[in-house]
Image (cartoon, rainbow, N blue to C red):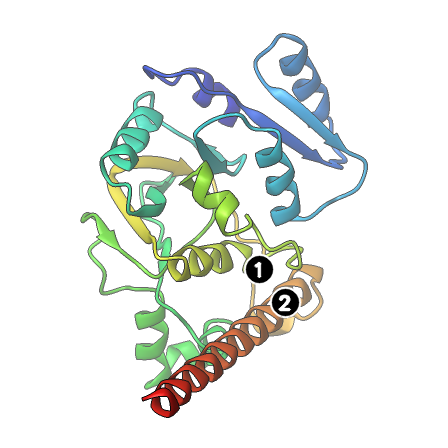
């Protein structure tokens, strides 16, 4: 479904489809091998599950294009999507990450943008706290429920189901941080791109359909028994520790520079 929609794209530029089979256990690899033999895709087969970020980095290393498009297998796009995204990115070189509106197959708009968050925001999101005030307001602010999802705007963070980056910027920031096996690597990449001086932009004039099922569905007690819950927790701890340390290092560097300037003057 994903590959077929990409093949039907109408563009005025060449593009390649690279698929990493992350040690899949179903029969999807047979379809991928056939597609590769027929020249539809470039297939990379991994004998072990590399994780989301590492697998995407592997695909990017084998890519030859000016742009890198990260796209989950449960996404389909209209024929004009690639052309419109690339045209908009070409017109706005200050953009480091560009993402379309994501729409669920039932027509509902996915809340695919996030404000910078704290660890407490994730706690609220995963517990019944989000149902009571003042945590409900905090939860809604984090998910940008007050956000106009029909307006192109700069945002803090975007979910990584489908977004476009210039290849130079992807390489400049080092791609995905491979210390995350699953979850948070997309938010981390957005933050790295912003820290490098580029914009993260939501562009709803382009839409994609997301046939999405949450990996972390269910209540808190039900989630505790799922491997994905602990993967999410592990990634969240890595994310907040990383950026807390980075902020502390940057603050220390600024103080040293300021003190040096005072002494020099």
Bin the neighbour count of mark 2 within 10 Å (Cα to Cα): few under 14, some 14-19, many 20 and up. some
| Residue 114 as seen in the image, left or right of residue 241 | left
Q: In which quarter of the image is the C terminus?
A: bottom left
Q: Furthest-front residue in view?
A: 264
Identify the element where label 2 is drawn.
helix
Position in image of residue 216 (x %, y %): 57, 60
Residue closer to the observer: 233 or 44: 44
The circle drawn on residue 72 is none
Mark 1 = which residue? 216
Other residues around mark 1 within 10 Å, as few (<14) / some (14–19) / many (≥20): some
Residue of label 2: 223
Nearest to N terminus: mark 1 or mark 2: 1
Q: Provide residue 59's location: percent of width, then percent of height.
A: 61, 34
Which residue reaches farthest right? 47
Taking the image as drawn, is residue 1 in sight?
no
* Residue at the image point whose x is 37% and y is 87% from the top: 264
**Which image quarter: residue 262?**
bottom left
Residue 32 in percent (x, y) is at 66, 21
- Pointer 1 with pointer 2, Cβ within 8 A: yes
The quadrant where residue 114 appears: bottom left
What residue is at 67 percent from the left and 19 percent from the top? 31
Asked if residue 194 lies left or right of residue 228, the reply is left
Whole-Å distance between the Cαs marked 1 and 2? 7 Å
Q: What element carries label 1?
A: loop
């Amino acid at each position: 479904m994903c590959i077929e929609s990409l093949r039907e794209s109408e563009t005025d530029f060449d593009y390649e489809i690279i698929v990493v089979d992350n040690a899949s256990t179903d029969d999807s690899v047979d379809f991928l091998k056939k597609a590769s033999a027929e020249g539809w895709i470039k297939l990379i087969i991994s004998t072990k599950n590399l994780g989301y970020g590492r697998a995407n980095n592997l695909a990017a290393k084998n890519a030859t294009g000016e742009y890198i498009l990260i796209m989950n297998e449960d996404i389909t796009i209209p024929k004009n999507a690639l052309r419109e995204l690339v045209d908009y990115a070409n017109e706005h070189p200050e953009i480091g990450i560009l993402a379309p509106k994501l729409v669920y197959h039932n027509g509902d708009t996915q809340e695919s943008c996030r404000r910078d968050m704290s660890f407490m925001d994730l706690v609220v999101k995963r517990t019944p706290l989000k149902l009571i005030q003042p945590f409900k307001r905090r939860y809604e602010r984090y998910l940008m429920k007050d956000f106009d999802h029909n307006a192109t705007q700069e945002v803090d963070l975007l979910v990584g189901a489908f977004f476009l980056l210039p290849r130079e910027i992807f390489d400049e920031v080092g791609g995905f941080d491979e210390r995350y096996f699953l979850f948070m690597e997309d938010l981390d990449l957005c933050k790295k791109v912003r820290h490098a001086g580029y914009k993260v932009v939501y562009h709803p004039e382009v839409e994609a359909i997301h046939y999405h099922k949450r990996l972390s569905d269910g209540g808190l007690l039900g989630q505790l028994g799922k491997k994905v819950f602990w993967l999410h927790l592990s990634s969240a701890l890595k994310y907040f520790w990383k950026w807390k340390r980075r902020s502390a290092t940057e603050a220390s560097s600024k103080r040293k520079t300021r003190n040096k300037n005072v002494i020099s003057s």
